[in-house]
Amino acid sequence: MELIFATSNKGKLREASEILGEGYRLLCPADLGITEEIPETGDTLEANSLQKARYVFEKCGRDCFADDTGLEVDALGGAPGVHSARYATDGHDFEANIDKLLAELGKHPGEPRTARFRCVVTLIHKGGTHTFEGKVEGRIATERRGNEGFGYDSVFIPDELDGSTFGEVHEGKNLISHRGRSLRALARWLKENG
Ligand code: IMP
């Protein structure tokens, strides 16, 4: 099945291809000539995920899905949350975002460093809109470890691993990750309803 994933993030695209497997051929907006940045101006992950999927659907009229992901850190009152991509700067600067996250957490010594990734996927299928959510609980490391993955992976230690960050996991992130969980729910839904 051919599906459009409304993202220009190469890390997300690679993971989605691995998670959905051989039955799916994923296209990204650039493959359809949509090269501008897709707006995400909502106040919630749900709103942004819907906004990105709708934007691409309105441009090309084809079934598509989008995800919006937030890293929610308890000691920071749930920040950066929906603002995870632009936490430190206006651009998608992963390194600056991590520097800011570690600096902000440094202002809360002694507090738990518990956090979670939450991912909301919106699928537009035959004109209908369907939402799937996945999350993974964990904690924030005190410094970066590992070069795998992207974004905040080098400072996120999922509870279900042995203390490694996602950045240290060569294979297996998708089995327990927020995106793995939400996209497997999407695939199950498509199998039953597609
Ligand atoms: P968005 O869903 O593209 O808005 O992502 C929000 C921010 O979280 C961006 O800075 C992403 O790089 C980061 N992010 C999204 N998914 C992941 C992930 O699986 N691991 C680490 N960082 C992520």
Image (tube, rainbow, N blue to C red):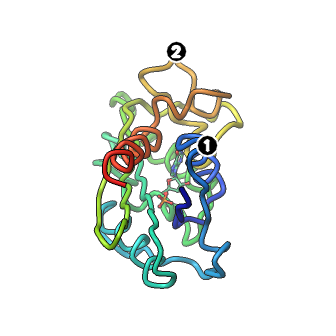
For residue 162, the mark is 2
Q: Is residue 189 above or below residue 123?
A: above
Image location (x, y in percent) of residue 113: 39, 32
Image location (x, y in percent) of residue 89: 55, 67
Q: CA distance from mark 2 to mark 1?
A: 30 Å
In front of the other: 170 or 154: 170
Q: Is residue 34 above or below residue 43?
A: below
Residue shown at 31% from the left, 52% from the top: 193
Residue 84 lies in what quarter of the image? Answer: bottom left
Residue shown at 37% from the left, 65% from the top: 125
Image location (x, y in percent) of residue 110: 36, 27
For the C terminus, the quadrant is bottom left
Image location (x, y in percent) of residue 3: 52, 61
First in sequence, mark 2 or 1: give its number.
1
Residue shown at 54% from the left, 31% from the top: 142
For residue 22, the mark is 1
Disc 2 residue type?
A: Asp
For residue 170, the mark is none
Disc 1 residue type?
A: Glu
Q: The residue tagged with tag 1: helix, strand or loop?
A: loop
Between tags 2 and 1, which lies in front? 1
Q: The residue tagged with tag 2: helix, strand or loop?
A: loop
Residue shown at 57% from the left, 22% from the top: 164
Is 39 displayed left or right of 72 in the figure? Answer: right
Is 37 displayed left or right of 48 in the figure? Answer: right
